[in-house]
């Protein structure tokens, strides 16, 4: 077992993080107050903001999200395509300003923010010293820019969904230099880490975390994949369309997966949160809603935060073309359905 340090109760209270002692002092259960959360997907992590079925983020999005009952946004950002390739890996100042404006707008609406690095594809293909240094260099700048933001509301996620050649064998070696840079300016800010194979739920079995009391584990949930990604043209091969949701096998998968989270909490003393979940837009809406609701209800049993993918994109909860929440999706997230036209 990885040695875990413990946040003091006063520190936990300051962060709004629950602490439940489940055994000896070394087994405190810690979690972030993520609550109901939504990803601002296909905006800042796309090559140009708002591609891939998303839209350009504007300040009116955040009061709408907060009014619906969400507590947190996850903000995926592709820093790597806006930063120089050589040291010190300078991030485009205009882009940094854009991210800071979005964070400020979200905070004005009272939302928590998870700020990540997303789609740094080079490091997944080649987790070499050069790319490790570049990731650390980008986080040096990001951490410094946001160091004065309250720790209770803004959290960092070093790199989204390790996959391909970025895996358990090198996870800590890849992430530790970036974490060290973050800690120079943000010594106690919560930092989120997910495991290999796109941070699927089974990655928690072997996820090793740094010896740091303010690390929070995460996982993503798109099971069963042949349902959630049917018709997804970015998957090879594309899962065929026509798969419905709600069989006995589907229900058993959920039961088994909730138990995996219980087992992880008992084993590590840390409570992960679900950083992404959802089903592809071309799936009939009734099935998308059924899936979203089933997953949310199931994992509510273990009290974890859940971030839907996504606000308005290929897995939409908000229909920006019609200017309204997709019918049934707020209820599926355990939130009041919006009134007509809202």
Image: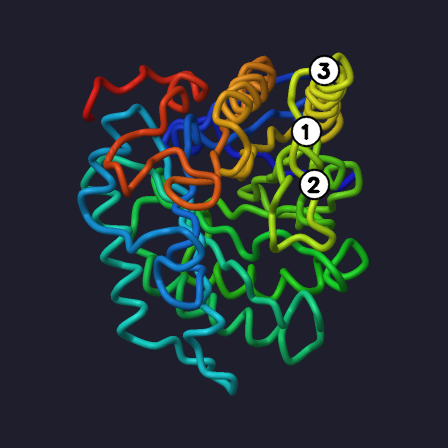
**Residue under the point 31% across and 45% down:** 150
Quadrant in which the C terminus appears: top left
Tell me if label 3 and label 2 are in contact, CB under 8 Å.
Answer: no
Q: Is 321 in front, or is 267? A: 321
Q: CA distance from mark 1 to mark 3?
A: 11 Å
Relative placement, left or right, of 80 versus 129 is left
Q: Secondary structure at mark 3?
A: loop
Q: Quadrant of residue 291?
A: top right
| Disc on res. 240 | 2
Neighbour tally class for label 3: few under 14, some 14-19, many 20 plus, Cα within 10 Å: few
Q: Residue at x 23, y 33 (%)?
A: 64
What residue lies at 38% left-to-right and 40% top-to-bottom?
311
Q: CA distance from mark 3 to mark 2?
A: 18 Å
Residue on which the image places disc 1? 243
* Location of residue 200 in the rendering, given as x and y in whole percent from the top left corner: 69, 40
Q: Residues within 10 Å of mark 2 (few under 14, many from 20)?
A: few
- Give the tally of numbered discs: 3
The colour scheme applied to this rendered structure is: rainbow
Among the two numbered marks 3 and 2 on one chain, the one whose residue lies closer to the N terminus: 2
Relative placement, left or right, of 289 versus 91 is right
Q: In the depicted view, which residue is nearer to us: 42 or 122? A: 42
Query: Are circles 2 and 1 on residues that touch, CB within 8 Å?
Result: yes
Q: Quadrant of residue 28?
A: top right
Q: Which residue is mark 3?
A: 247
Going by the picture, which residue comes out furthest to the bottom?
A: 86
């Amino acid at each position: 077992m990885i040695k875990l340090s413990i946040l003091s109760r006063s520190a936990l209270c300051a962060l709004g993080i629950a602490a439940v002692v489940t055994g000896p002092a070394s087994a405190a259960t810690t979690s972030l107050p993520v609550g109901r959360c939504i990803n601002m997907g296909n905006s800042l992590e796309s090559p140009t903001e708002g591609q891939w079925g998303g839209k350009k983020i504007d300040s009116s999005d955040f009061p709408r999200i907060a009014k619906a009952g969400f507590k947190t946004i996850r903000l995926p950002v592709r820093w790597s395509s806006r930063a120089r390739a050589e040291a010190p890996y300078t991030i485009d100042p205009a882009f940094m300003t854009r991210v800071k404006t979005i964070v400020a707008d979200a905070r004005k609406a009272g939302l928590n923010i998870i700020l990540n690095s997303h789609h740094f594809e080079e490091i997944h293909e080649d987790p070499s010293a050069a790319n490790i240094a570049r990731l650390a260099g980008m986080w040096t700048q990001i951490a410094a820019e946001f160091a004065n933001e309250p720790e209770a509301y803004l959290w960092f996620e070093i790199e989204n969904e390790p996959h391909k050649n970025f895996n358990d064998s090198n996870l800590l070696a890849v992430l530790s230099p970036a974490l060290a840079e973050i800690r120079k300016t943000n010594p106690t800010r919560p930092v989120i880490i997910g495991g290999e194979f796109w941070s699927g739920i089974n990655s928690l079995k072997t996820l090793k975390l740094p010896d740091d009391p303010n690390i929070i584990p995460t996982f993503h949930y798109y099971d069963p994949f042949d349902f959630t990604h049917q018709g997804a043209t970015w998957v090879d091969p594309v899962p065929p369309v026509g798969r419905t949701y709600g069989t006995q096998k589907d229900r058993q998968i959920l039961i088994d997966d909730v138990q995996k989270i219980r087992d992880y909490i008992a084993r590590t003393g840390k409570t992960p949160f679900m950083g992404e979940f959802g089903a592809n837009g071309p799936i009939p809406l009734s099935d998308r809603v059924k899936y979203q609701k089933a997953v949310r209800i199931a994992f509510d049993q273990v009290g974890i935060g859940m971030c839907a993918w996504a606000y308005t994109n290929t897995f939409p909860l908000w229909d920006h073309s019609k200017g309204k929440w997709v019918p049934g999706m707020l209820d599926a997230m355990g939130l009041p359905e919006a009134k007509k036209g809202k």
